[in-house]
Image: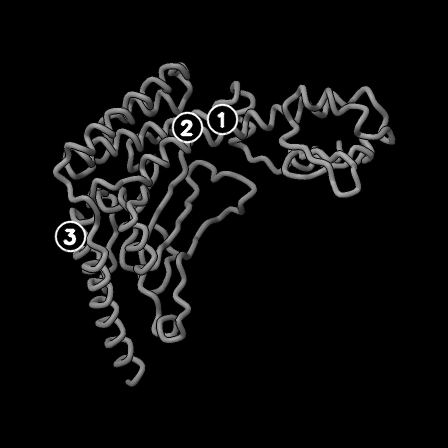
Amino acid sequence: MNTSRPKNLICEIKFGSHLYGTATEASDEDYLGIFLPTLEEILLGRIPKTANSSPKDDSRKNEAGELDATYYSLHHFLRLATQGQTGAIDMLFAPETMVYKSPEYGWVWDRIVENRSSLVSKQMNAFVGYARGQAAKYSLKGDRLNALRTAIRSMSVHEDDVPFKMTVDAVKFSQAIQDERRNPQGIMEYQIGGKWFGESTSIGNVRASIQNSIKRYGNRANAAASAEGHDWKALSHAVRVSKELIELLTYGRINFPLADAPLLLDIKQGRVPMERVQEILDSDLAFVEVQAAQSHLPEKVDNKWWDAFLVEIVSEHLSNEIVRVMK
């Protein structure tokens, strides 16, 4: 477990591939946790959403064995859970062997778990959105990265001081141009990598900007670009979430490690054809539509009940903190 936890820790949960049952030797260690805000944060109205503990910066992925921990304030966690956000719902069903509860505030997690069934409803739109989004997110990034690289090659036949308009048609063919417009001065402008360039801009400037855009793409987008635009890890997460949603709508809970862990690991390692992955996603999401209509789950989460729960917990916490300060 992590030795750099926030103050007033409630619990910490081993997350990610270790929870799902898809860990490999290359897997890092991911943790999600919950904490109570301090007396000062509450009284000053500065309750943070999250706190992080990670040995890396955002420029690289964790290496095998490295620890990456994110902690949610109780307020933010309950907001995520009542919205049906995937990470929060997964935390609710983590087995006890994956959960560390603090001696002082672990009872808060016990209370949440006792009532977790009331956080599951038919309106699990976040799961559906995540499944669809992950299926497209990094594949799209891989496609864009390939387009930018093709655009660079298409301009290589011209010197740096040549106007960009001389190679616009070639860049359009590479699909790197996202949009075009005519500015108030009547000059055509083209959007590439999120930036706009006038037709009179030198190719050297356009090329330098595109190269900077390419550098900003992360390792996963680069992997997707070299794998015909597919990010197998993102696709495995999309299938995972669709399987979890089916289990939630059918049984009202999720069992970890996941029964479909072998399939998810095969997808993650690129051993399942893209066509088959798409078939699984299409079939699962179609089943979800039918199952949601037939499910005995409540239509929506009772937010007022959880608001009252939060008030009760924080009031008790505040009372204890004030007593501590007065002493």
Viewer-closest of 106 and 163:
163
Quarter location, residue 293: top left
Residue name at image x 87 percent, y 31 percent: 161
- Report the residue at 84% width, 30% height from top: 163
Q: Nearer the viewer, residue 182 or 138?
A: 182
Numbered mark located on residue 115 in the image = 3
Under mark 2, the amino acid is Ala
Secondary structure of residue under mark 1: helix
189 on left or right of 271: right
User: What residue is disc 1 on?
Assistant: 139
Question: What distance separates the C-alpha of mark 1 from that of mark 2?
Answer: 7 Å
Could you classify mark 2 by the number of other residues whose Cα lies within 10 Å: few (under 14), some (14-19), or many (20 or more)?
A: many
Task: From the top left corner, tell me how far across and down residue 103 is, in percent.
Answer: 22, 61
Mark 3 Cα-neighbour bin, 10 Å: few <14, some 14–19, many ≥20: few
Say which residue appears at 65% left-offset and 27% top-offset.
176
Q: In the picture provided, is 286 more to the left or to the right than 172?
A: left
* Residue at 40%, 74% in the rendered image: 44
Q: Report x, y in % for residue 110.
A: 17, 55
Look at the numbered disc 2 and give the secondary structure of its residue: helix
Q: Is residue 307 above or below residue 186?
A: below
Q: Earlier in the sequence, mark 3 or mark 2?
A: 3
Is the residue under label 2 in contact with that under label 1 (CB below 8 Å)?
A: yes
Mark 1: few/some/many CA within 10 Å (<14, 14-19, 20+): many
Dot 2 corresponds to which residue? 135
Relative height, residue 293 to residue 115 (above, below): above
Q: Position of residue 52 (x, y in %)?
A: 43, 54
